[in-house]
Image (tube, helix red, strand yellow):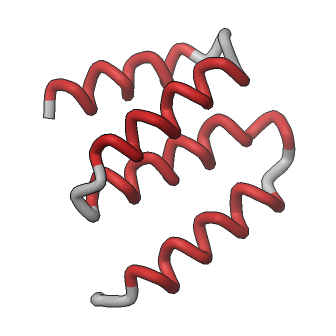
Amino acid sequence: MGERQAARETIERCCQDVPQKQLSMALLEYAKYFEMVDQVDRARQVMQQTKHLVKSEWKLYFEVVMLEFR
């Protein structure tokens, strides 16, 4: 609680260390972090970049819709 910087650093490390097959899910969590700290534009940016990296991940597209819905 209240450790935003530590949380961000942990997620960023996860994104660096995660196996390639799981990268889209790690980046999705990174986008959710930005949403939670009221940086919705940054969350959208991360999701858009992830969509370009992984075009076949259905859950990512679903989460993009849910972000806009929220």
Percent x, y for residue 42? 40, 46
State left or right for residue 64 relative to residue 46. left
Percent x, y for residue 12? 65, 65
Q: Choose between 21 and 42: the one closer to the eye.
A: 42
Residue at figure coordinates x 53%, y 14% from the top left: 58
Give residue 13's quadrant in the image.
bottom right
Q: Choose between 59 and 4: the one closer to the eye.
A: 4
Residue at figure coordinates x 66%, y 18% from the top left: 52
Residue at the farthest bottom position: 2
| Location of residue 54 with respect to 28 vertically, above or below | above
Give residue 66's quadrant in the image.
top left
Residue at figure coordinates x 29%, y 88% from the top left: 1
Percent x, y for residue 3? 38, 88
| Location of residue 41 with respect to 2 vertically, above or below | above
Residue at figure coordinates x 59%, y 45% from the top left: 27
Percent x, y for residue 35? 30, 51
State left or right for residue 60 relative to residue 25. left
Q: Looking at the image, how many numbered discs can be counted on the residues?
A: 0
Quadrant of the image containing the C terminus: top left
| Location of residue 67 with respect to 14 vertically, above or below | above
| Location of residue 27 with respect to 52 vertically, above or below | below
Residue at the farthest left position: 70
